[in-house]
Image: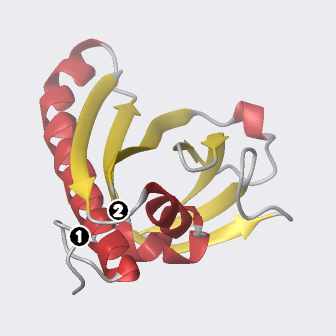
Amino acid sequence: MGHFKYASDVGAPVEVAFTYTDNYQFVPDWAFGVVAFEPIGDSDHGSGAVFAATLRVGLWHPTIECEISDYRRNAVIEYTLRRRRTGKPTSACHNFCVITLRFDPLGYGRAVLTSETEYWVPRGLTGKLLGKMAAALVQATVHRTESQLRREIEEFHGTDLVGRIA
């Protein structure tokens, strides 16, 4: 498994940052490459909620399944991404990425957003050949997503990085 972790200051309180991130309708605004994010089933937030995420990868637009696997209000949202296989139970689908977003208070009106990503890397010769390329791609994607999420939270809250009203 590959692993990346980024942390950044957000010019908004934990409650505001979490509320913005918890709203599935905003996910395409901050998640790099996501063009649609729709709930599957009745639940649209909280642990166990499942979503169909349509990605944009060049001309290819795959749909993957995204489940909230850990959810602690104003603290953690963890998404497990897996390939979507029509007609197969969720347990038969292969997990290929876990994204964890942690929210910690930093002081009055500020928070720390920590983005952690664990991703599957092929084994053997193929894994060695493609591992560094995949790592660079995942690292750039996670960094861009985390930066965009921070900007969107601050815009949602109406402040900039140091908490000034924008």
Give yes or no for contact between labels 1 and 2 (Cβ–Cβ under 8 Å): yes
Q: Which colour scheme appears in the figure?
A: secondary structure
Please give the name of the residue rendered at 52% of the width and 60% of the height, measured from the top-left corner: 15
Q: Amino acid at mark 2?
A: Gly
Residue 77 in the image: state x and y as whole percent: 55, 46
Residue 107 in the image: state x and y as whole percent: 31, 50
Q: Residue furthest right?
A: 42
Q: CA distance from mark 1 to mark 2?
A: 7 Å
Q: Amino acid at mark 1?
A: Gly
Dot 2 alpha-carbon crowd within 10 angstroms: few under 14, some 14 to 19, many 20 or more: some
- Residue 63, by quadrant, is bottom right
Residue 27 in the image: state x and y as whole percent: 48, 69
Q: Which residue is mark 1?
A: 163
Please give the name of the residue rendered at 33% of the width and 57% of the height, measured from the top-left corner: 108
Whether residue 127 is visible, yes or no, is yes
Q: Which residue is mark 2?
A: 109
Q: Camera-side residue: 59 or 4?
A: 4
| Secondary structure state at the residue bearing disc 1 | loop
Dot 1 alpha-carbon crowd within 10 angstroms: few under 14, some 14 to 19, many 20 or more: some
Looking at the image, residue 53 sits to the left or right of residue 104; the answer is right
